[in-house]
Amino acid sequence: MKKINSFEELEKLRKKLKGIKDKEKIIISVCMETGCIAAGSEEIYRELRKEIKKVKNKEIKVIKTGCHGFSEVDPAIVIYPEKIFYIRLSPNDVKEIIEKTIKKGEIVERLTYKDEKGQIIPYLDQIPFYKKQKRLVLSLNGLIDPENIEDYIYYGGYTALSKVLSGMSPEEVIEEIKKSGLRGRGGGGFPTGKKWEYCRKAEGYPKYVICNADEGDPGAFMDRSVIEGNPHSVIEGMIIGAYAIGSNEGYVYIRHEYPLALKRLKIAIEQAREYGFLGENILGSGFSFDIDIVRGGGAFVCGESTALMASIEGKVGEPRAKYIHTVEKGLYEKPTCLNNVETWANVPFIINNGWEKFAEIGTDTSKGTKIFSLVGKVKNTGLVEVPMGITLREIIFDIGGGIKENKKFKGVQTGGPSGGVIPEKYLDLPVDFDRLNEVGSMMGSGGMIVMDEDTCMVDVARYFLNFLKEESCGKCVPCREGINQMLEILNRITQGKGKKEDIEILKEISDFMQKASLCALGTTAPNPVLTTITYFYDEYINHIEQKKCSAGVCKDLIEYFVNTEKCTGCTLCAKNCPVNAIEGERKKIHKINKEKCIKCGICFTICKFNAIERK
Amino acid sequence: MKSVEIIIDGIKKIVPKRITILKIAQDVGIEIPTLCYHSAIEPYGACRLCIVEIERNGRKRYVTACNFPVEDEIKIETNNENVVKIRKLILELLIAKVGYKGKVKEYAEKYEVEPRFGIGNDDCILCGLCVNVCKEIIGVSAISFSQRGIERKVSSPFEKEPTNCIGCGACSFVCPVDAIKVEDIKNERIIKKINAKLELEKCKICQKPFIPKKLIEYIKNKLGANVLLDIFLICNECKGKNYVDKLLPFSLTGGKK
Ligand SMILES: Cc1cc2nc3c(=O)[nH]c(=O)nc-3n(C[C@H](O)[C@H](O)[C@H](O)COP(=O)(O)O)c2cc1C
Ligand code: SF4
Ligand code: SF4
Ligand code: FES
C-alpha cells in the first residue's frame, strides 16, 4: 500500500474499498479475542474457512473480529447482514450452518440463543443481553477485522482525523471534547477536554500523550477488548488528542499479560504508519505524530499515572506526589496527557458526530456510554456497553438476566478492587460517576461483580483488601501499614475472634488512609470495608457477637453435621471426604469427626438426601 | 507574580512561589515532624508524618509539607487536632512495625501515642533515606527497595553482595531508626543489612585498617586530586580532628558526626 498523502486520497481509497466490500453479501464473523479463543473459536474459524471455500461464492466472507461481549455463550458467530447469532458452537456444527443458513437462508434452531422460557431468539439485536446496550465504542467490534486497517477505513475510520487535520484548530478540537462532556474512563472521571486544555497551555516541549492500557483490575477486560477488537479507534483518538495538545510523541502502556492485544496493536500501528496516519506529515497536513508501545511493569499500581510514567522512564513503577500535575510535569518532567483506552476510543465518535450527539446520551454529569465487565453470580456474564444513567437493576437483571440459579441478589461491587459494595436498596441507582461516589463506591474502570445471598460481606471486604495488600507498592505508611492492620482485624472477625471496638478501629483507619495516603490506591482501598460496614452492619455484628457467618462462608464459624433423620447410610459422603472425617457403616447413620473436618463442604454438596446440614 | 501571601498557623507571610510548606515552617520557626525528609535529598513523601491541613477557596485537604509546593494563597494549619490525629496513627502503625526506635520513639513520646496494634521488632521503617542518599548524593545506587506492599524491604540487588557499594556508610548515617549498622572488624568493613563486605586500607600512621579501599577509589574519582589523598589515608584518631567531614554533606569515613 502506498502512503496516503492527502484527505482526497483517503476518500478515494474509501470509495475503492466500497466497490470491493459492497459485493460481500454475507459476512460470517467469528470472534477472536483472548476469551473466545480460549473457548475454542479458532477451530470454528478454520472449519468455516475450509467449508466456505468449497461453496465457491465470492459474496460470502469469513472474518476474524473482536468480541461480541457475551462471554457466557462463547464460542459464537454472527452472520451479517441479518445478524444471526449462533452460540456455543463446536466445529461439527459448521457443515450444518453452511448447508442450511448460508445456502438456504434457514435458521439452525438448536444453535440459537433461547430465553428463559425456551423461546428461540435467532437475531443478535433481539437478545435481552444486547437490547439495552448502546454500542458506541464497541460499535465495530465484531464487524471488522482488527488486523486489517482497510476494514476500519471502509466503515468510516480516520474520517474524524481527516476532519480535524483539514479544518479544525487545536482549540476547536478541545472545545468540542469539552462540550461533549467526556470524562476519563480509567477511574477518576476527570473531564477529558479540560485535561487536554491544561496540557496544551502548559509550558514545555516535547509534550507527550499516553494511552493507559494497563488494566490491572482482576476480572476486567474492557480495554483489552477494545484493543483486540478495534485498535484503530484508540490510535485515531490518540492522534487527534496529540494534535489538540501539540504533541508529536505518544506511548501506549499495555499490560504485560495481554499478548494478543499487544500483537494487534503492533499490527495496527504498523499499518497506520504504512497508510500515513502516523509518522511525518500526516495526510499532508504538516502535522507529525508517532506512537511507541511500552509493556507494563506487571503490577496493579503501575496503572496509576505517576507510577506508569516512572515505569516508561525505566524507573521503578511507584507513585510520587502529584501536587504539580502531570499535564504540567509528567513523563520526563514534560507536559503529558494520559488517558485511558476507552477514553481515547470515544474521541473519533465525538468528532465525527459532533459533541451534541454524544452529550445527548447519559446524565447531567456523565455523558456517553460506559463499558462494564459484568461478572460474578449473574446469568449472562460478559462485556456490556451501556448508556450512562442506566440503572444497576437494568444492567444486572435485564442485560445480565438476573442471578444464577435464581438465588437472591445481595450486592454488586463496582469500580474494581477498591470500589464499594452496593446493596439491594440502591439497585435503581442510575449509574454515573457521581451517583456511584455518593453511595461510597466508584465507576473505576468498569468492573462489576455481582454477589448473591451466599456471599459473606465480611469475607468480601477481606478478599479485596487482601488483593490490595498484595498490590500496594508499600511506599507510604498509611497504605502499607493501614491495609495490613485492617486485614488483621478482618481476619480476626472472620475467625470469630472479633471485638466490638474493631468496627470503630476499621473506620478510623479507613478515614486516615483516605486522608493521608500518597496515591489513589491507598485513598480508595478502604471503600470495600466502609461500604460493607455501612450496608451490611448486621453481618459484622453477627460475626463478632454471635460468632456466626450467616452466608456459611467463614470456615471457623460454621459446622457441618449429619441430620440423623435424613441419613440413609449410603456412605457417599464418607467416600468423598478428602480427610476421612466421616465415620459410619453402610446403612447406618454417619457421623462427622469435628477434629478432623476441614469444612470443605464436599459432603454438604454431595449428599443426595440433604442429610448434611450446616450451622 | 513570583510570590504569594499565605497564612501558616495564623502567621501571615509572603513567600516565593513553589517553595515547600516545610521550608516556610522552618523559616518561621514552626516544627513539623519528618521521618523520610533530609534537606540534601529530594523529598520522597513516603512517611506522611509531615502532613498538614491546607485550606484553599474554602476547601480543606491534607498535604505533605515536605514536598507540597505553594502556588497560591492558602491557609496552612500544621498542628491542629486533625493533623495530630493522623500523625498519631502513623506513629502507632510504625510502632507496630519496629517498636520504639530512634526518631519513631522520640516522636511517639512527644505525641503520646498509645499503641493498640502491638509493638513490633522490625528494624526498618522504609523511609527510603538510605536508598535515596546512596542514589542522589553518593551516586552509586548500591541498594534499593525490593518487593511490594508489606513485604517491601531495603536490600542490595538480589540480596547478594552489592558490587558497587563503596562502604561510605551514608545510608547508616541518615537512617532515622539506626537500622544500618556499620562494623569494622579486623581488615573488613561489614554492613550486614545490605550484605556489604569491604576490604579496609590501613592508616598511614597507626597501621590500623580504617577506610574501605573502594571508598578511596571513589574519592579519587570524585575529587580527582591525588595531592589531597593523603588526608584520607590517616584515621580519625591520628588526625585528631576530622575536617574531611566538613567538606561533604555526609561523613564519608563512616563515623557519625
Ligand atoms: C492503583 C491505580 C491503578 C490504576 N490503574 C489504571 C488502569 O489500569 N487503567 C487506567 O486507564 N487507569 C488506571 N488508573 C487511573 C490512572 O491513574 C489515570 O487516572 C487514568 O489513566 C487517566 O485517564 P482518564 O482520564 O482517561 O481516565 C489507576 C489508578 C490507580 C490509583
Ligand atoms: S497509597 Fe499505596 S500504592 Fe500508593 S504510594 Fe502509598 S503505598 Fe504505594
Ligand atoms: S534502613 Fe533506615 S534509612 Fe533505610 S529505609 Fe529503613 S529506616 Fe529508612
Ligand atoms: S517527611 Fe514528608 S512525607 Fe516523610
Image: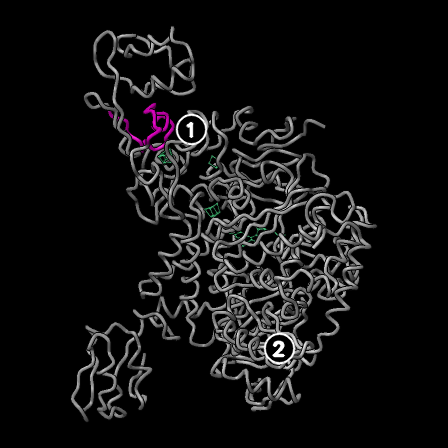
Label 2: chain letter:
A
Q: Where is residue B126 in the image (x, y as percent from the top left)?
A: 39, 39
Residue type at mark 2 is Val
Q: Do labels 1 and 2 share a chain?
A: no
Label 1: chain letter:
B
Q: Is residue A512 visible from the viewing direction of this image?
A: no
SS category of the residue bearing label 1: helix
Residue furthest to the left in view is A585
Residue at (19% x, 21% y) in the render = B186
Left or right of A592 in this view: A497:
right
Left or right of B59 in this view: A562:
left
Q: Is residue B228 visible from the viewing direction of this image?
A: yes
SS category of the residue bearing label 2: strand
> How many numbered markers are drawn?
2
Q: In this view, does A471 lie above or below A551?
A: above
Residue at (57% x, 41% y) in the render = A322
Residue at (43% x, 26% y) in the render = B139
Quadrant containing the C terminus of chain A in the rendered view: bottom left
Q: Name the residue under label 2.
A: A78
Say if the magenta span includes residue A262. Answer: no
Establish whether ligand 3 lies closer than 8 Å to the Cβ of label 1. yes
Q: Give the range drawn in magenta.
A: B163-183
Q: In this view, does B144 lie above or below A251?
A: above
Magenta stretch prevailing secondary structure: loop
Quadrant containing the N terminus of chain A in the rendered view: bottom right
Q: Name the residue under label 1.
A: B133
